[in-house]
Amino acid sequence: MGQASLSACAGREGYAETVSVELLESFLRQLSHDVRNDLNAMELLISYVECEKSGGDVGNALTQLHDAVRYGARRMLRVSRAVQVPDLEYIPYPADILYADLKDRLTQERPQLAARIVWSRCDLKTVAPVDATLVLEALTELLENAAAFSSCESPVQVLVDKSENGVRWQILQHALESPSNLEQWGLLPLVSTRRSHYGLGLFRVRRIIRAHQATLSFHYDAIGKKLATEVVFSSSP
């Protein structure tokens, strides 16, 4: 069974992805574990509501139950969306406004991540046609990845400048050595070096970037001990 694999054609993208049965088994095992935990939490809350000793805490328990249901539903939605081919709705998005929107989004929704980021000034007015929702999702995931693979004390830097054909985004993180298989990051789904993760984050990012006909690359600077994530969006649709 070690050589068994499943192949799926990505349709419009015109390429095939082959995933080993072992990776699929690991993914389903982790997903089943997480779903069981969600259901167990809901069951405990229901049991508490049914218990005569719950008293006036019933309302609070029901609120927690609603939160648990929503959390589980969002998890399944994220997993489902991660394996779908992105469907883009383009809008002209100036680089400086996208930069400001990303900063505001992280400050509101992911304050711990935002606190790790060095936000340099961005006055670049170059416009790239992108899907706003998907690009913000992809950039957020790349920043999450950079923060996760660098020490918690080190900052993550974001730089935006003009490239030959559009806009270049760079995410710089401290790294004592080059991670293995940089060029393979995100090429296959269900591959993750982080425990309890599905291995769909960078895979989803690559699909979003590819759908925009943009480029994603990773480079390691051994002298400066820096790992750079680079995304280039074209100014032409």
Image (tube, rainbow, N blue to C red):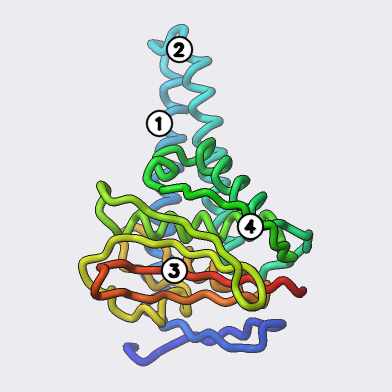
Which tag, 1 or 3, sits closer to the chain's start? 1
**Residue 232, picture quadrant:** bottom right
Which residue corresponds to the image point at 40% horizontal and 40% vertical from the top-left? Answer: 115
Q: Quadrant of the N terminus?
A: bottom left
Residue that carries the numbered disc 1 in the rendered image: 44
The residue mark sitting in front, 4 or 3, is 4
User: Helix, strand or loop at disc 3?
Assistant: strand
Q: CA distance from mark 2 to mark 4?
A: 53 Å
Residue that carries the numbered disc 2 in the rendered image: 57
User: Helix, strand or loop at disc 4?
Assistant: loop
Residue that carries the numbered disc 3 in the rendered image: 229
Q: Are marks 3 and 2 in contact (CB under 8 Å)?
A: no
Which residue corresponds to the image point at 56% horizontal and 30% vertical from the top-left? Answer: 66
Which tag, 3 or 2, sits closer to the chain's start? 2
Residue that carries the numbered disc 4 in the rendered image: 124
Which tag, 2 or 4, sits closer to the chain's start? 2
The residue mark sitting in front, 2 or 4, is 4
User: Helix, strand or loop at disc 2?
Assistant: helix
Q: Residue 26's spot in the image, x, y percent?
A: 36, 69
Question: What type is the residue that disc 3 sits on?
Answer: Thr
State the residue lying farthest toward the bottom.
3
The residue mark sitting in front, 3 or 2, is 3
